[in-house]
Image (cartoon, rainbow, N blue to C red):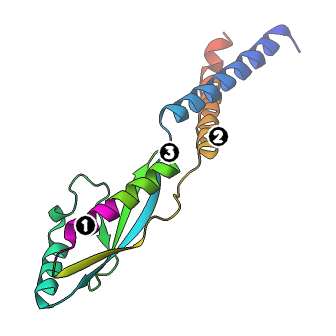
Amino acid sequence: MEWTARLHMAVFGVVVVLGALAGAGLALLYPPVLSSRAVVLEVAKNAAGEKQLAAIKHIPVLLNPRMSPPPSYVDSDSYVLEITGKARTAAGAQDAASAAARSYARRVSSPDIRAVVLDPATPATGTTMPVWVAGFAMLGALAGAGAMIMWRPVLSR
């Protein structure tokens, strides 16, 4: 093999490794978002409570408008509310879901309505950091390889 071919292979390898490192760095800058769910049960104590619950279900602004994603009822006829908390860490997602569920239960509870947090927060789910970094590193390596393949005719002149 002549020296130019070896040089091309070395440059190719360096660019692929740099692409993988850039992809891993990008993954560290933008970590994955994990989510956790909490469940709240709303119980009306009398007819007035039923009317209030019906109103609450149809006015999502009464929920926290900054909550993302907004809480959703499991079934349109039920008073079981699922609240999802999202964060960069598993503990943060669980804390967000639990805090939102407790806050909502306190906010909705009245003499006519009782809101109870059934499930404080499920274990957080989502892509783990090692898988996230590996995926971005592979994409970076593929981008580096693709760039070298496209530039090969230019480099061989």
Q: Give the distance between the C-alpha atoms of the residues marked 2 and 1, in whole angstroms.
A: 42 Å
Q: Which residue position holds label 2?
A: 134
**Residue type (three-letter) at the residue carrying disc 1:** Arg
Q: Residue furthest right?
A: 1
Q: Which residue position holds label 1?
A: 106
Q: Residues within 10 Å of mark 3 (few under 14, many from 20)?
A: some
- Find residue 2 and report its horizontal and vertical position in percent: 86, 11
* Mark seen at residue 32: 3
Tell me which label, 2 or 1, sits earlier in the chain. Answer: 1
Q: Which residues are magenta?
A: 100-110
* Residue 99 picture quarter: bottom left
Left or right, 43 with respect to 125, comes to: left
Left or right, 132 with respect to 29, comes to: right
- Find residue 48 and report its horizontal and vertical position in percent: 10, 86
The secondary structure type at the circle numbered 3 is: loop
Q: Is residue 25 above or below residue 107?
A: above
- Find residue 6 and report its horizontal and vertical position in percent: 82, 14
State the residue in front, 102 or 73: 102
Residue drawn at (18%, 79%), measured in percent from left and top?
53
Q: Which of pointers 3 and 1 indicates the residue nearer the eye? A: 1
For the N terminus, give its image quadrant: top right
Please report contact status of discs 2 and 1: CB closer than 8 Å, yes or no: no
**Residue type (three-letter) at the residue carrying disc 2:** Ala
* Residue 112 picture quarter: bottom left
Q: Is residue 104 magenta?
A: yes
**Residue type (three-letter) at the residue carrying disc 3:** Pro
Residue drawn at (58%, 26%), measured in percent from left and top?
22
Q: Residues within 10 Å of mark 1 (few under 14, many from 20)?
A: some
Left or right, 152 with respect to 42, comes to: right
Tell me which label, 3 or 2, sits earlier in the chain. Answer: 3
Residue drawn at (20%, 70%), measured in percent from left and top?
108
Left or right, 135 with respect to 13, comes to: left
